[in-house]
Amino acid sequence: MPRPGEFRVSVEKDYLVFASAHFITFAGHRCEGLHGHNYRVRVTVEGGLNEEAWFVYDFVELKRIMKRLCDEIDHLVLLPLQSRRVSVVEDGEMVNVSVDGKLRYVFPRRDCALLPIPNTTVEMLAELLVTRLRGELDAQGARGLTAIEMEIEENFGQSAVYRVALNAPS
Ligand SMILES: [Zn+2]
């Protein structure tokens, strides 16, 4: 029976966090120094009801996927691979990070997460996690989902939200 309303489910858990270091560049020549956040993640998926289970998506599965995505970048230095100002060059077991052409940091490669984003803002991290979650959901054959929304908080009361409709071109 068609319903006039829509459903969505959200997950926000103490373990959906990643404690990571980063720095961002601003317009012009400003650039932050390296620092860290205890990032917190909240994810919402929208969609039709699974007609056998009467849910939108299995919470257990959603939590499992999100925990893995957070763990992948937990306790690492987050570095942008698509920045016009920050260059990230792997050199054996090390990573050389230059800003505006000047070498600024050298990190062990194993301590870095090299991310396909232009800047490590919470906006870009939210978009990246949506892309990764979408890939996982596709791989699991999830059906009937209509949107994913990801909120990433880097400080209390300071967060970014990215929402994508799943029928939109990826
Ligand atoms: Zn920061």
Image (cartoon, rainbow, N blue to C red):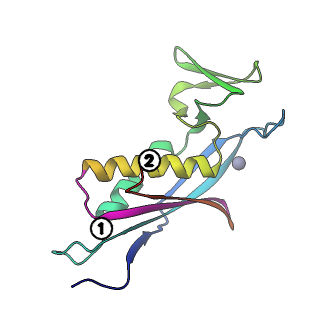
Give coordinates of residue 44: x percent, y percent.
Answer: 44, 67
The reply to whether the magenta stretch includes residue 148 is yes
Q: Is residue 51 above or below residue 14?
A: below
Count the marks. 2
Q: Nearer the viewer, residue 113 or 162?
A: 162
Q: Nearer the viewer, residue 91 or 128?
A: 128
- Is residue 109 among what the camera can see? yes
Helix, strand or loop at mark 2: helix
**Distance in Å between CA atoms under marks 1 and 2:** 17 Å
Residue at the extreme top of the image, as rendered: 92
Q: In this rendering, would 167 be left or right of 99?
A: left
Q: Residues within 10 Å of mark 2 (few under 14, many from 20)?
A: some
Q: In this rendering, would 33 be left or right of 170?
A: right
| Residue occupying image coordinates x 69% and y 68% | 157
Q: Nearer the viewer, residue 166 or 110?
A: 166
| Residue occupying image coordinates x 39% and y 57% | 166
Q: Is residue 14 above or below residue 98?
A: below
Residue range highlighted in magenta: 140-156
Q: Main secondary structure of the magenta part?
A: strand
| Residue occupying image coordinates x 23% and y 78% | 54
Q: Is residue 135 above or below residue 3?
A: above
Q: Residues within 10 Å of mark 1 (few under 14, many from 20)?
A: many
Q: Which residue is labeled 1 in the image?
A: 57
Helix, strand or loop at mark 1: loop
Q: Is residue 152 above or below residue 3?
A: above
What's the mark number on residue 42?
A: none
The reply to whether the magenta stretch includes residue 37 is no
Which quadrant of the figure contains the N terminus? bottom left
Q: Which residue is labeled 2 in the image?
A: 131
| Residue occupying image coordinates x 37% and y 51% | 134
